[in-house]
Amino acid sequence: MRGDTPLFLTKLLGYRFDKKKGKAPLSFLAAIIASGLTMAAPSEAPAQALAVLLNEQAAAWTRGDLSAFCSVYAEDATFISPSGLTKGRQAVLDRYRKKYVDKAGMGALTLDVEEVRALDGGNASVVARWKLTWPDKPEASGLTLLVFRKTREGWRIVQDASM
């Protein structure tokens, strides 16, 4: 191979880097940009999509629909709380059904998003404050850290640490 430019770049861009001159011409840099090596902006901002999803999840909880509430969890989700570790969407659903036997016991849920971070590989994390209220007993509240994965079906919770 002659020159200092790798063969695949020479074929792709039609240019060889000139070591003697020590720089690439503007046409070379323009070719790199035009070749699609730049990152495309996501079509939907994770913060907005996740806020909508969490509002839907809170509404499902408040109407007593644990199946809809847990449908957002990935099949292999991990749930962490002060009472222990639960693995798998079905196990998370079973845990909630055992703890909250009827709609009256569930109360009304609100989730206030504090922070959303877009992570690499179609993942995002959310820090939120949760609050449960009932007409006849004191409210309960805490924090949650959720890790989401973007799938063909939409955003799914893969890890939930609720305290």
Image (tube, rainbow, N blue to C red):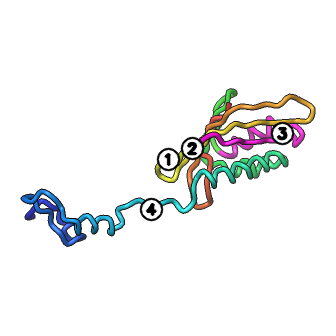
| Spatial CA span between label 3 and label 2 | 25 Å
Q: Which residue is mark 3?
A: 106
Check whether the beta carbons of the residues at disc 2 and disc 1 lie within 8 A of each other: yes
Q: Would residue 32 appear left or right of 109 to someone viewing this image?
A: left
Region of the chain picked out in magenta, as a range: 89-116
Q: Alpha-carbon neighbours of circle 1 within 10 Å: few (<14), some, or many (≥20)?
A: few
Q: Secondary structure at mark 3?
A: helix
Q: Secondary structure at mark 1?
A: strand
Residue type indicated by callout 1: Leu
Q: Which residue is mark 4?
A: 40
Q: Name the residue furthest right.
A: 136
Please report the residue visible at 15 percent of the width from the left and 58 percent of the height from the top.
Answer: 23
Q: Which residue is mark 2?
A: 125
| Spatial CA span between label 3 and label 1 | 32 Å
Front in this rendered view, residue 146 or 89: 146
The spot of residue 45 in percent (x, y) is: 57, 56
Residue type indicated by callout 2: Ser
3 or 1: tag closer to the N-terminus: 3
Q: Secondary structure at mark 4?
A: loop
